[in-house]
């Protein structure tokens, strides 16, 4: 994110209000990445307030949610939280002109359908296992050579072989960790899509119930 050090305080406050509205409506997103199935902010995004939040398996996006709050956005633009809260209250009291402008200027990206995501997930799983197969295939010849050396003399001559074997085992472990992280991220994304789909269906059902309860206009 662009440094705010050179901006005036009114400009920082204006940007903070817009950023808060954008993030609260999920039109803008904090900078970060998934590590071992947990979301963490980037170095540019992280502020001291983030240190109090610790994501867990039960709340993998705890920090991502925190980075959408007024407290974090205020810290991001180097203004006091009370100033941002007061500005947001004033905007809402005036009919939310800033919020409406931010929301209306957003162009939603095309949605990724479940079918497309499932295809992507299958492809990612296939590539992950192919990477593991390649790593195992790289290790097998060395394992056979080490097995053939059992009972033979010449320990010094075996040192280069052992070093090479160690390097390839490290490569295999790295491939395993990478595959685990990738599959964990895909599982989290799939769960999020299912949650969003359920919420969308629930919103549709509520809308239909409201429309059915609306009184019909009197015949003229």
Image (spheres, rainbow, N blue to C red):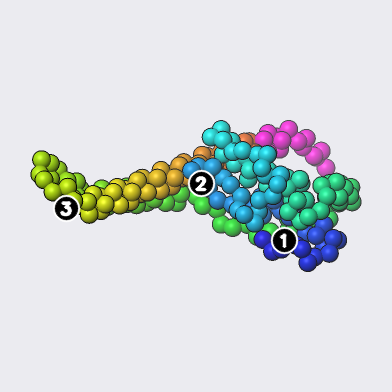
Q: Is residue 5 left or right of residue 34?
A: right
Question: Over which residues does the magenta segment extend?
Answer: 206-220
Q: Nearer the viewer, mark 2 or mark 3?
A: 3
Which quarter of the figure has residue 17?
A: bottom right
At mark 1, the secondary structure is loop
Residue drawn at 73 percent across, 54 percent down? 76
Q: Earlier in the sequence, mark 2 or mark 3?
A: 2
Residue drawn at 65 percent across, 53 percent down? 45
| Camera-side residue of 193 and 150 | 150
Q: Is residue 206 visible?
A: yes
Kindly report the distance in space between the C-alpha atoms of the residues bearing marks 2 and 3: 41 Å
Q: Is residue 197 visible?
A: no
Q: Nearer the viewer, mark 2 or mark 1?
A: 2
Percent from the top left, x then y, of residue 75?
A: 75, 51
- Which residue corresponds to mark 1? 105
| Camera-side residue of 197 and 15 | 15
Kindly report the distance in space between the C-alpha atoms of the residues bearing marks 2 and 1: 32 Å
Discs 2, 3 touching: Cβ within 8 Å: no
Residue drawn at 23 percent across, 49 percent down? 162
- Which residue corresponds to mark 3? 157
- Which residue corresponds to mark 2? 35
Task: Give the vertical position of 195 relative to 119 (above or below).
Answer: above
Residue drawn at 76 percent across, 56 percent down? 77
Q: Earlier in the sequence, mark 2 or mark 1?
A: 2
């Amino acid at each position: 994110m662009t440094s705010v050090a050179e901006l005036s305080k009114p400009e920082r406050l204006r940007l903070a209000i817009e950023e808060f509205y954008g993030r609260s409506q999920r039109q803008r997103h904090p900078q970060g990445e998934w590590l071992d199935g947990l979301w963490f902010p980037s170095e540019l995004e992280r502020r001291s307030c983030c240190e109090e939040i610790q994501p867990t398996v039960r709340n993998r996006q705890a920090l991502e949610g925190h980075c959408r709050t007024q407290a974090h956005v205020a810290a991001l633009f180097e203004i006091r939280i009370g100033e941002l809260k007061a500005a947001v209250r004033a905007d809402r009291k005036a009919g939310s002109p800033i919020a409406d402008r931010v929301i209306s200027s957003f162009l939603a990206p095309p949605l990724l359908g479940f079918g497309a995501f499932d295809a992507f997930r299958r492809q990612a799983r296939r590539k992950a296992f192919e990477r593991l197969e390649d790593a195992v295939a790289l290790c097998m010849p060395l394992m056979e050579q080490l097995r053939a050396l059992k009972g033979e003399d010449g320990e010094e001559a075996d040192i280069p072989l052992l070093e090479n074997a160690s390097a390839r085992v490290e490569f295999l472990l790295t491939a395993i960790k990478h595959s685990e992280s990738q599959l964990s991220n895909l599982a989290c994304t799939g769960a999020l899509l299912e949650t969003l789909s359920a919420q969308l269906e629930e919103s549709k059902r509520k809308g239909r119930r409201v429309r059915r309860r609306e009184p019909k206009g009197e015949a003229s």
